[in-house]
Image: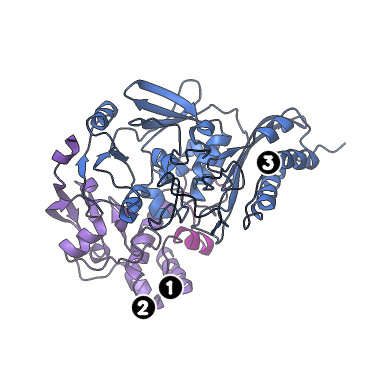
Amino acid sequence: MKGFGYVRPTGVQEAVEAYAAHPGARYLAGGTNLVDLMKLGVETPGVLIDVGRLPLDAVEELPDGALRVGATVRNSDLAAHPLVRDRYPVLSQALLAGASGQLRNAATTGGNLLQRTRCPYFQDLDKPCNKREPGSGCGARDGVHRDHAVLGHSPHCIATHPSDMAVALAALDARVELYGAEGGRSIPVADFHRLPGMRPERDTEIRPGELITGVLLPAVRAGVPSAYRKARDRASYAFALASVAVVLRVADGIVDQVGLAFGGLAHRPWRAHHAESALLGAAATPEAFEGAVALELERAEPLRDNAYKVPLARNLALDVLNRLAPAPATA
Amino acid sequence: MTSENRLDPHSEITLRVNGKPQTLLVDHRRVLLDLLREDLGLTGSKKGCDHGQCGACTVLVDGRRVNGCLLLAVTLDGSEVTTIEGLGGDGEEPHPLQRAFLERDAFQCGYCTPGQICSAVGMIAEAAAGHPSHVTDPAEPSGRPVPLDRTEIRERLSGNLCRCGAYPRIVEAVEDVIG
C-alpha cells in the first residue's frame, strides 16, 4: 500500500474544506471497502479524510414523520433501530442480508452507498477493466461473468452494484443528502447510482469533494408492508445473485402504493418503473404481479453465463409481492 | 506541487489494549491487526484472508466485534481494544467461551478460534441488546433481547470461517455459554 496523509475534521464544513485543500483525497468512514481496495492497489489516495467520527450518527424523526439517517450510522445500528424495523422493514432486512456482523458494525450508511463493485476484474490490477482504468477494456464481458449484470449494462462495463441497503432505499423513495463546496443538495437514491454507458469509472452522480451527510426516508403511512429477499450462493455472508425490495400497499384489492427494486442485476439498484406503472391502480392479483414483473424483465439482456438471473429475479419478486398482498376477501 | 505531499504519513495514537494504555507512532497504513501482532506482540488475533472475508482477525473495539484487518489504526485513537488475550480479564481464569470451546473441542487446527470466540462475545451482546439478524422473524417486536437458537447462532457467526469445519461444536460451545 502507498503511504498517505491523514486528517480528521470535526465537522462537515471542515471535511469539505479538507478536500478542497487536498484534491483527489478520499473520504474514509468504516473503511470496509476502501481499505480493502487500498490493499489491492485499486485505490491509491494521497490523503484520507476521516469522516467516520463526524456528528452524523443519529437516526431522527422529523416533524413531518420522515426519518433522517446520518451518514455515519453503522449498518448494524440502522438495521436494529426500532423505527426502521417497525416502519421500514425492507431496509432492516436488506441490511441484515448483507455482509457479516463484524462488517455491519463498521460499515456506514454513506459508505454502503459508495461501495464499489466486487467484479473480480475491477479488483485485479492485472486484468483489463474500464471502470478501474478507462479504455483498458472489459475482461468480464467474454470472461467469467456469472455474477454480472443483465439489465442496463454497456459494451464498456457489465458490473453490478453490490449493495443490498441501496436496493431497499430505492424502493422506499429515499433521498441521498449531499454537501459540497457549492452547498447542500439531495437526490433520489434511485437516481444516485449511474448506468455504466461510456463512463463506467463513474459509479454515482456525486461530485468531486461532495460528502454524503445522510439519507432521508419519506414518512410512511402506518403499516405499509415491505420486505426484502435475496438469493445467493450460500445461506449467509455472500453478495446477491439477485435480490428484490418491495413496498406494497393494497386497499380494497387495488394497489395504491408500490415500490419495486432489484439488486444484483445492474450497475445500480434497478428501480422497476415499468412494473410499478403497470401495478399502480391495478387489482392486486398473482396474474397482475406476473404481468408487471415480466414487463420489467423483458428488458433484460443476459450474457453468455448469467441468463439464470432473469427467472431467479422474477421468482423472487413474485414471491414477495404475493406474500405482501393481503389475501383476497372471500365473497 | 500538491499540498498532500506535506502531510506526515505517521501519527501518534493512544489505545487501551486489554485495559492497558498504549501510545504508539503508527504508519497510517498500519491496520489494527498488524499493530496488535507486530507492534504489541499480541499474536492471538490471526491473519487469515486479510480482506475481511474470514473473520480470523475479529477483535472487540469499544465492545463491538470488528475485523482488525480492515481498520486503520490511526482512525482508532482513544479506542478500547479487547483481544483474545484480554477476554479473561486480569485473572488466570479463561473467559467462559474459551472454557466452553475447550470442553466441546470446538476446533481442529485452532487458527480461526480466537476470532470465533471474540465474534461470539460480540454477537451475544448484540442479541442481548435486541439486534435482529437475517433469520430473526421480522414480526418479532423490536427493542427486546433476541433468543439465540442454533439457526441464530449460525447466522450471526457466518462472518467467521472454519476451514476445518468445526461448526457443529462451535455452535454447541456457544449454546453452553448462553445457557
Q: Which of the two residues, A159 or A8, is positioned nearer the viewer here?
A: A159
Q: Which residue is mark 2?
A: B109
The answer as to whether the residues below labels 2 and 1 share one chain is yes
Q: Chain of mark 3?
A: A
Q: Which of the two residues, A172 or B50, is positioned nearer the viewer here?
A: B50
On screen, B96 above or below A66? below
What segment carries the magenta color?
B138-158
- Pointer 2 local density, CA inside 10 Å: few below 14, some 14–19, many at least 20: few
* Relative horizontal placement of residue A323, taking residue B165 as reference (left or right): right
Residue drawn at x 54%, y 58% is A143
Q: Nearer the viewer, mark 1 or mark 3?
A: 3
Q: Which residue is mark 1?
A: B163
Which one of the lettered chains is coloured blue?
A
Picture coordinates of residue A197 (x, y %)? 53, 38
Q: Nearer the viewer, mark 3 or mark 2?
A: 3
Q: CA distance from mark 1 to mark 3?
A: 41 Å
Asked whether disc 2 touches disc 1, contact meaning CB atoms under 8 Å apart, the reply is: yes
